[in-house]
Image (spheres, grey):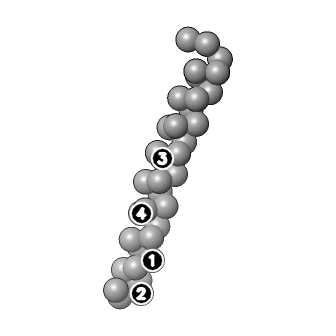
Amino acid sequence: MSAPEKRKRLVERVIVAWDAVSEDSIKKAWLKAGL
């Protein structure tokens, strides 16, 4: 696998992980707000 491909895969994984984390944070914030 070439370096650019490795970098692209890493970026995609980070984006997916960030999506999951931010979604979780949003849900917790909503629960705290009682919505």
SS type, badge 2: helix
Instruction: State the separation of the CA atoms marked 3 and 4.
Output: 11 Å
Q: Is residue 1 left or right of residue 26?
A: right
SS type, badge 4: helix
Query: Where does the image place residue 23, in percent across and percent down from the top left?
Result: 43, 62
Q: Is residue 21 above or below residue 29?
A: above
Q: Give the residue type that dot 1 points to.
A: Ala
Which quarter of the figure has residue 1? top right
Q: Of the residues under marks 1 and 4, which one precedes in the sequence?
A: 4
Q: Give the residue type that dot 3 points to.
A: Ala
Q: Which residue is mark 4?
A: 24
Q: Which mark is residue 17?
A: 3
Q: Are marks 1 and 4 in contact (CB under 8 Å)?
A: no
Looking at the rendered image, the quarter that the C terminus falls into is: bottom left
User: Counting other residues with Cα less than 10 Å from the Cα at mark 4, is it few (<14), some (14-19), or many (20 or more)?
Assistant: few
Residue, x 49% and y 61% (percent of image)? Answer: 22
Residue, x 58% and y 29% (percent of image)? Answer: 8
Q: Which residue is mark 2?
A: 33
User: Counting other residues with Cα less than 10 Å from the Cα at mark 3, is it few (<14), some (14-19), or many (20 or more)?
Assistant: few
Q: Are marks 2 and 3 in contact (CB under 8 Å)?
A: no
Q: Of the residues under marks 2 and 4, which one precedes in the sequence?
A: 4
Q: Residue furthest bottom?
A: 34
Q: Of the residues under marks 3 and 4, which one precedes in the sequence?
A: 3
Instruction: State the separation of the CA atoms marked 1 and 4.
Output: 9 Å
Q: Which residue is mark 1?
A: 29
